[in-house]
Amino acid sequence: MLSKNKLIIDNEGITQQLFFGKLKEFKWKEIRASHLSWIYHVHGASLEWVIVSSSGKSINLQTSSYNRKNMRFIAEAIVEKCPHAKIDKRIINMAEGKFRWYIF
């Protein structure tokens, strides 16, 4: 079921389409921040990529669901299209092809 989730990046913005048809769509100018955050579970933790809009809504991406090439593409798009946003240094590094060991 989770594989049915889609992330669509185009010139207009970024859209997350979930399995049940719910859409979260942000125009590039609406994005105010992007950061990585650890989510702790009962038996471990996972790294989540959070993209926040000016209205306070967010798109949450599990980094384990994407390969290095796709993560770099997403990071490049955010860094290029959202110069006004507060972007985590680790995401800027990913856009340059520099990945921390704990991301994979």
Image: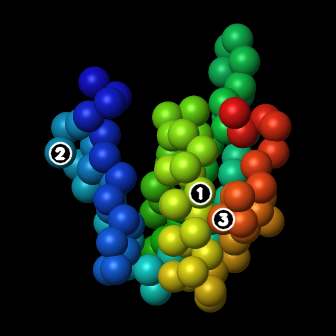
Q: Secondary structure at mark 3?
A: helix
Sooner in the amino-acid sequence: mark 2 or mark 3: 2
Q: Secondary structure at mark 2?
A: loop
- Quadrant location of residue 72? bottom right
Secondary structure beneath label 1: helix
- What is the distance, in whole Å, between disc 1 and disc 2 at their CAs? 26 Å
Task: Please tell me how crowded label 2 is: few (under 14), some (14-19), or many (20+) other residues with Cα within 10 Å.
Answer: few
In this rendering, the label closer to the viewer, 1 or 2: 1
| Foreground of the two, 40 or 80 | 80
For the question of whether residue 16 can be seen, the reply is yes
Identity, as a three-letter code, of the amino acid under mark 1: Arg
Q: Which residue is mark 2?
A: 21
Count residues near mark 1 (Cα–Cα under 10 Å), then give few for <14, some for 14-19, many for 20+: many
Q: Are marks 2 and 3 in contact (CB under 8 Å)?
A: no
Asked if the residues shown at circle 1 and circle 3 are in contact, with their CB atoms under 8 angstroms apart, the answer is yes
The amino acid type, in three-letter code, at marker 3 is: Ala
Looking at the image, residue 23 sits to the left or right of residue 27; the answer is left
Residue farthest along the left direction in this orientation = 21
Report how far apart the C-alphas of labels 1 and 3 lie in the structure.
5 Å
Residue 41 x/y as whole percent: 66, 21
What residue does disc 3 label?
A: 95
Identified by mark 2, the residue type is Gly
For mark 1, what is the residue? 72
Q: Residue at 82% across / 37% down in the picture?
A: 101
Which is more foreground, mark 2 or mark 3? 3
Q: CA–CA distance between discs 2 and 3?
A: 29 Å
* Snapshot quadrant of residue 51: bottom right
Percent x, y of residue 50: 58, 54
Q: At 59% from the left edge and 63% from the top edge, which residue is drawn?
A: 75
Residue 31: image location, x then y, percent: 51, 76
Look at 26% across and 55% down and name the residue there: 23
